[in-house]
Image (cartoon, rainbow, N blue to C red):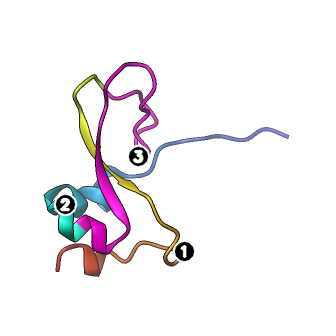
Amino acid sequence: MGYLIKGLSPETFSPLFELDHNALAVREMKRVTAISKPGYPCRVSLQDAEQGAVRPKRIGLKGSSLNLSQATS
């Protein structure tokens, strides 16, 4: 049986990139800076981030899905 792994649409997550550290923390997320390549794959595109790239990262398990209507508030 074959399967295909592909990245998620970046548009789904774009509101998160505009949030500050406090707004991310409310959602149990934090901003992470890649300090080496490889080692920090983007969870959206599945490509290794360039050194110095900054991305939000989910750190908690509060709920099983991301409500993007909350992401922009």
Q: Which residues are magenta?
A: 24-49
Q: Please identify, in this view, whether the residue under mark 3 or under mark 2 is nearer the observer.
A: 2
Q: Please identify, in this view, whether the residue under mark 1 or under mark 3 is nearer the observer.
A: 1
State the image quarter where residue 41 is shown: top left
47 is within the stretch colored magenta: yes
- Residue 14 picture location, percent across and down: 23, 57
Q: Closer to the camera, 29 or 1?
A: 29
Residue at position x 25%, y 73% in the image: 71
Does residue 16 appear to the left or right of 18 in the view shown? right
Does residue 19 appear to the left or right of 65 in the view shown? left
Residue at position x 46%, y 26% in the image: 39
Q: Is residue 23 above or below residue 33?
A: below
State the image quarter where residue 50 is shown: top left
State the image quarter where residue 64 is shown: bottom right
Label pair 3/2, CB-CB below 8 angstroms = no
Q: Amino acid at mark 3?
A: Val
Residue at position x 72%, y 41% in the image: 3
71 is within the stretch colored magenta: no
Please give the label number shown on residue 44.
3
Check disc 3: other Cα within 10 Å, few if <14, some if 14-19, many if 20+.
Answer: some
Q: Amino acid at mark 1?
A: Ser
Label pair 2/1, CB-CB below 8 angstroms = no
Q: Earlier in the sequence, mark 3 or mark 2?
A: 2
- Residue 45 picture location, percent across and down: 41, 39
Q: Earlier in the sequence, mark 2 or mark 1?
A: 2
The residue that disc 2 covers is 21
Label pair 1/3, CB-CB below 8 angstroms = no
- How far apart marks 2 and 1 lie (CA) works out to 21 Å
The residue that disc 1 covers is 64
Q: Is residue 49 above or below residue 2?
A: above
